[in-house]
Image (tube, rainbow, N blue to C red):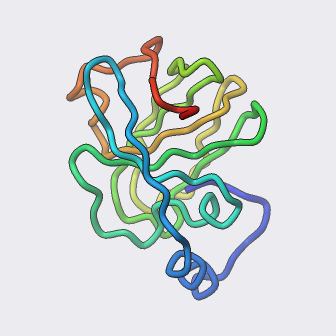
Amino acid sequence: MLFLSIIACPPLVRKLSANQEKTKKTLKINEKNLTVEVADTFEKKLTGLMFRKELGKDEGMLFCFDKPQKPVFWMKNTYLPLSLAFIDANGIILQLEDLKPEDLTPVAAKEKVLYALEVNKGWFEQNKIKTGDVIKGLAD
């Protein structure tokens, strides 16, 4: 979950997440396809994958930022173990992190990025995806 300076109470977050229209797209990393929900609004970034009980095998959430920045994520109200990729404007994976369910420890990008991608924990490793790999389909 994206760490924001605004604290939202869980009922508000649940209401926001229930009313959001889901935009999906397909990304390609090496030869692997990944279907992602796009978090491109404040509300979608705020809720992320909160309160979800499952995430499909080759699915994830793509956070899109307006300009390069060093976002910070945490796992408040997020029940799934996740892996996170910080991605620059050229689609290059700069950093990979594993996240623990409901862990409030902030995880920050070390460099400015334009995207962040959350998937099931271990997905990058299982698909031999590493830092330096390029993600295609981000700007489509």
Residue 94 vs residue 23, the one in the foreground: 23
Instruction: Give the image quarter of residue 139.
Output: top right
In the rendered image, the residue lying farthest to the front is 140
Which residue appears at 75% of the width and 30% of the height?
Answer: 68
- Quarter of the picture containing the N terminus is bottom right
Residue 6 location (% of width, % of height): 78, 67
| Total numbered labels | 0
Question: Is the residue 56 above or below the residue 31 in the image?
Answer: below
Which residue appears at 45% of the width and 23% of the height?
Answer: 135
Residue 49 location (% of width, % of height): 46, 61
Residue 34 vs residue 139, the one in the foreground: 139
Residue 123 location (% of width, % of height): 27, 36
Which residue appears at 64% of the width and 32% of the height?
Answer: 109
Question: Is the residue 22 above or below the residue 94 in the image?
Answer: below
Question: Is the residue 71 above or below the residue 6 in the image?
Answer: above
Which residue appears at 57% of the width and 85% of the height?
Answer: 15
- Quarter of the picture containing the C terminus is top right
Instruction: Give the image quarter of residue 129.
Output: top left
Residue 93 vs residue 41, the one in the foreground: 41
Question: Is the residue 93 above or below the residue 115 in the image?
Answer: above
Residue 80 location (% of width, % of height): 34, 59
